[in-house]
Image (cartoon, rainbow, N blue to C red):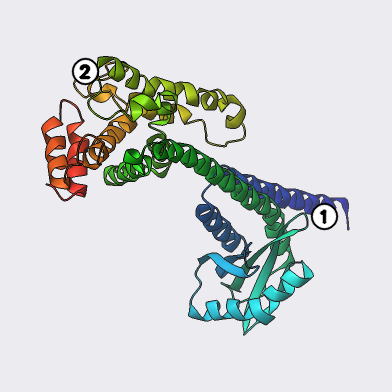
Amino acid sequence: MDNTNELSLMTQKLLETYEELTLIHDFVSRIGGMLDLTKVFDEIIDEAITISKAKWGGILLINELNGKLELNSSNGVDEISHKLIEYSCEKGLINKAIHEKRSIIGKEMDSFVMIIHLSLKEKQLGVICLGDKVDGDSFYSTEMKLIETMSFIVSFVIENTRLYLSLQQLFFSAVESLSFAIDEKDPYTHGHSRRVMQYSLEIAEMLGLSEKEKIVLKLAAVMHDVGKIGISEAILHKKGTLDYEDWEVIKQHPLKGVHILQPMQESQAITASADIRFKDIHGIIDGVKYHHERYDGTGYPEHLCGENIPLIARIIAVADAYDAMISDRAYRKGMSNSDACMELRFNAGCQHDPAIVEVFLRLKGDD
């Protein structure tokens, strides 16, 4: 081989390597910040099908509870290819790839398939299964090597996302436990925070809030009364009408709640770099701090009015007021749904955001 041909081959190889690195970089950029596993899986399958020119593909992960392979995402999988996958998991090439811990190209039930093994260190995660190239040919080892390179990164993303979601769920559970413990201190507020959270999320759904906004709202709603942990039980459990001094103490609970949540806000600098998405804690604090502001500006603690009150607090205010009205108290019987809805409508525009009241009344069947 002369120097010209050798240089041409080297140039071609460098171009191919550059294209592969660019492809991998773009793919990692797309999935690196994703915390929705469904979207991650969809991206993985779409990219693998594009690279391999397969007609169909699926990602199967090992269920951590029962150890079985489960199809988590697919593209182009029909009844025939689904049966192939089921057979392959039981006694075919997918089963072989798992047991031998390696990727495989072969033929199964008259279809050419490529099985990419997914693992992280010693932990097996599952496989990517691709079948039936568009041109009818077999899969190539070069395609397998490129997808294997991507699968190494994919395995990290899957495992890190799982760990994040577990951490997030643990955080939610701890927050709920704290809030529900406060409710349990008073038999008349039993389940109040949970119900306010549920009503708030129903309103959010009607308003078309994003999933991220719903998560922030969920946390704010469930913690809206967390400041009451610093209020004397003698006042919280007082039978009869509260006097002026009692109300002045009660009105401190939003600010006490902010004080309790302050360490979470201060941790943003640490968590933001890890993308643990607690950087929206200021939104949670807004809900806790301002859920007793009034639309006409006569609320507390800062006398905000109208849309100067954060949306999250305006939503919680309606949910909180409704649950307070329908719940029994030591000094009165709870209102009916109809009477509570009538009261909300009467106070729309002065105590509550009228638009949110209208949404909530539709939810309660009181148009």
In percent of the image, x 77 and y 54: which residue is there?
121
Tell me: 317 left or right of 74: left
What is the x, y in percent for residue 218? 40, 40
Q: Nearer the viewer, residue 173 or 41?
A: 173
* Amino acid of disc 1: Asn
Q: Which residue is mark 2?
A: 298
Q: Quadrant of residue 132?
A: bottom right
Q: Nearer the viewer, residue 43 or 121?
A: 121
Tell me: 203 left or right of 161: left
Mark 1 near mark 2, Cβ–Cβ under 8 Å?
no
What is the x, y in percent for residue 31? 57, 47
Q: Nearer the viewer, residue 30 or 164?
A: 164
What is the x, y in percent for residue 254? 37, 23
In percent of the image, x 56 and y 42: which residue is there?
33
Q: Is residue 353 visible?
A: yes
* Amino acid of disc 2: Thr
Considering only order in the chain, which callout, 2 or 1, is on the residue closer to the N terminus? Answer: 1
Q: Callout 1: helix, strand or loop? A: helix
Q: Nearer the viewer, residue 312 or 34?
A: 312
Q: Which residue is mark 1?
A: 5
Dot 2 alpha-carbon crowd within 10 angstroms: few under 14, some 14 to 19, many 20 or more: some
Q: Is residue 53 visible?
A: no
